[in-house]
């Protein structure tokens, strides 16, 4: 599923915006526990800035980042 976000949105915020977690704390925990895959690799970088075309996988969901360029 494509998800449109502002340029440089952080990974933890993407999980919240996509309603995959209910809070920033839950997002942080999921990332630190290695439950999030970014572009095919497990990541533990909570504040990773996403760019257009990045693919995030979490909890059976696959999100393709589409930035608005603003």
Image (tube, rainbow, N blue to C red):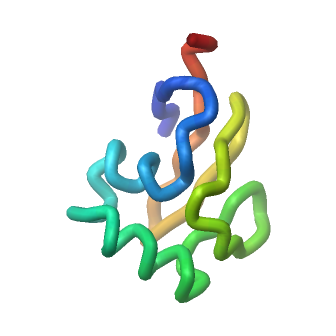
Q: Quadrant of residue 39?
A: bottom right
Q: Identify which residue is drawn at 66% across, 54% down.
A: 48
Q: Identify which residue is drawn at 43% across, 81% down.
A: 29
Q: How many marks?
A: 0
Q: Identify which residue is drawn at 65% across, 75% down.
A: 44
- Left or right: residue 61 compared with residue 18: right
Q: Identify which residue is drawn at 48% across, 28% down.
A: 5
- The quadrant in which the C terminus is found is top right
User: As rendered, which of 60 and 14 lies closer to the eye?
Assistant: 14
Q: Position of residue 68 (x, y in %)?
A: 55, 14
User: As rendered, which of 39 and 60 lies closer to the eye?
Assistant: 39
Q: Position of residue 4 (x, y in %)?
A: 48, 26
- Where is 59 relative to 54, above or below? below
Q: Position of residue 33 (x, y in %)?
A: 54, 88
- Where is 11 relative to 23, above or below? above
User: As rendered, which of 38 and 47 lies closer to the eye?
Assistant: 47
Q: Position of residue 62 (x, y in %)?
A: 53, 53
- Left or right: residue 9 compared with residue 18: right
* Name of the residue lying farthest toward the bottom: 33
* Name of the residue lying farthest toward the left: 22
- Where is 62 relative to 21, above or below? above
Q: Quadrant of residue 41?
A: bottom right
């Amino acid at each position: 599923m494509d998800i449109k976000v502002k340029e440089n949105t952080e990974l933890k915020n993407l999980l919240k915006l996509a309603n995959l977690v209910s809070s920033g704390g839950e997002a942080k925990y999921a990332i630190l526990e290695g439950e999030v895959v970014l572009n095919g690799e497990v990541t533990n970088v909570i504040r990773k800035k996403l760019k257009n075309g990045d693919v995030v996988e979490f909890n059976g969901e696959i999100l393709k980042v589409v930035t608005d360029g603003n």
